[in-house]
Image: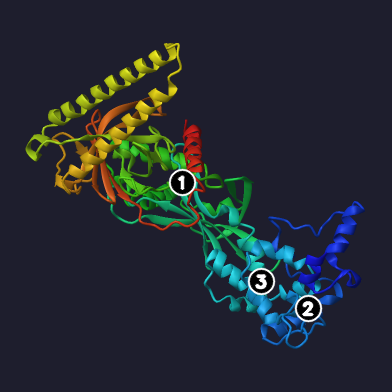
Amino acid sequence: MAVCARLCGVGPARGCRRRGAAREQRRGGAGDSEPDTDTDPEEAGGGGGGDDEEEAAAAERIEGGRPASHPAEAGPAGRAPLSLLELPPELLVQIFGSLPGTDLPSLARVCTTFRRILRTDTIWRRRCREEYGVCENLRKLEITGVSCRDVYAKLLHRYRHILGLWQPDIGPYGGLLNVVVDGLFIIGWMYLPPHDPHVDDPMRFKPLFRIHLMERKCATVECMYGHKGPHNGHIQIVKKDEFSTKCNQTDHHRMSGGRQEEFRTWLREEWGRTLEDIFHEHMQELILMKFIYTSQYDNCLTYRRIYLPPSSPDDLIKPGLFKGTYGSHGLEIVMLSFHGKKAKGTKITGDPNIPAGQQTVEIDLAHPLQLPDVENLRDFSELSRIVLEVQEQLRREEQEQEHRQEEEEAASQPAAKPLGGEGAEGEETAAGAEGTTQDKAPASQPFVLPMGVISRNEDYPRTCRICFYGTGLIAGHGFTSPERTPGVFVLFDDDRFGFIWLELKSFSLYSRIKVSFQNAEAPSREAFDEMLKNIQSLAT
């Protein structure tokens, strides 16, 4: 009670709300005054009944910098204030504006004066700017009758859980959605790779939906799909890290020329060309198949959250999202992440052979490859010999490790600590050897693709930093008979790498996606690993 009296400036004889709430709770009441860790900001500053005019006048005085009178506001001369209510209201506005918006509803329950002060739009303008980066001139909202508190509570706070990166569930094709606060809107942007085979070009993007405040009642969700402008839509947060969108006016997606016009329009947007320009029959089939499949999802989509990979100073390069060439399937988005002595490339977008969510390449950072000189590198058999020797070496190492494990299990005396120590020492030695190899490797060395290796993009770098043994995932249509086959990971620079698929005699070039994604960091390494596991299990 002493704490509450000091905060409010009122004691038991003056009707402390906190004491009244406690009394109601003892009587079995609802206990509405208990703080809520995720309370609705709409509760903060809300007036009721005949207090509206008085509260509006008080808020106006505070906005103008004129203190609102209160019997407990000013202490005797020469005495420091004993409660917050003895401070000038404009100072309280500064104090309350520095608090997280989710804490303000609890503060509003303390007393009527706090509730009046929390009606001040300056507080909510600051919260919109600091928590969500809204830099627009929010004073213009007064014309529409929408307050900054409305923007915070009914738009930004309400839909905060969908901000960040998401992968749409579109069968094997996947996708990359980025939901951001854009001015006074929340917009879902679908990111698309550049047109094949221009892997170094910037990403393309188009809006799928937007949310904004049309009036004070509630936020409006609009579908942006199609070519007839925004129309009525709906968003449902299914569960943690998952939400769905639905279009309520799918007729806006249709074109007057029917499916043929829709296909030609989609083809120009997706591939940057017409069907007549594509002479490869297999490629035509893949394109038509993708159009038919993805068109089924134009009215309802489910999205699952994805995180950017965490980075470490020991990483070969900065992990992140890359665009990569995949033959007749065009360009696809891959996430490169590091896991100790392994690096993994996980598909964010996919195709009928290797769907989104699958691990397309795995790099063994403990086994660097020393490429021959340029003339010998042109000979595919020479490169194949080098790679297969490392593959055989790895097979022997795995056999020896299995043999040691069997001996450990068969041993009657526990020797966990010595064996573990030796294993750890062996890992350190391998890591040290890896570091030494990288240190000794030249800053750059000539590189050329062997004769017979197919590349969609002939404009690949002609020098590289280092190469590693790796494996790539290949499969038949429908992800049938998947298998990992040997290949070569080629690091060109900080933003580009390549992979030679030995069995396919094919080369994929990858280029970093240079976009600063917000709200996409994983809360922990464990959360990121769990996310990878989930999207792979869904793909399987």
Q: Quadrant of residue 113?
A: bottom right
The residue that label 3 is drawn on is 96
Q: Secondary structure at mark 3?
A: helix
Residue at 29% across, 39% down: 327
| Mark 1 surroundings: few (<14), some (14-19) or many (≥20) residues within 10 A | few
Q: Is residue 124 left or right of residue 28?
A: left
Percent position of residue 300, x then y: 57, 46
Q: Which mark lies nearer to you, 1 or 2?
A: 2
Q: Which mark is residue 55?
A: 2
- Seen from the viewer's position, the closer of residues 149 and 66 is 66
Q: In which quadrant is the N terminus drawn?
A: bottom right
Q: Which mark lies nearer to you, 2 or 3?
A: 3
Percent position of residue 305, x then y: 52, 46
Q: Quadrant of residue 114?
A: bottom right
The kind of residue tagged 3 is Phe
The kind of residue tagged 2 is Glu
Q: CA distance from mark 2 to mark 3?
A: 17 Å
Could you tell me if the residues under marks 1 and 2 are in contact, i.e. CB atoms within 8 Å? no
Tell me if residue 148 comes above or below residue 322 in the rendering: below
The kind of residue tagged 1 is Arg
Q: Secondary structure at mark 1?
A: helix
The residue that label 1 is drawn on is 259
Q: Quadrant of residue 356?
A: top left
Percent position of residue 65, x then y: 67, 86
Q: Is residue 429 visible?
A: yes
- Seen from the viewer's position, the closer of residues 472 and 342 is 342
Say which label, 3 or 1, has the lower sequence index: 3
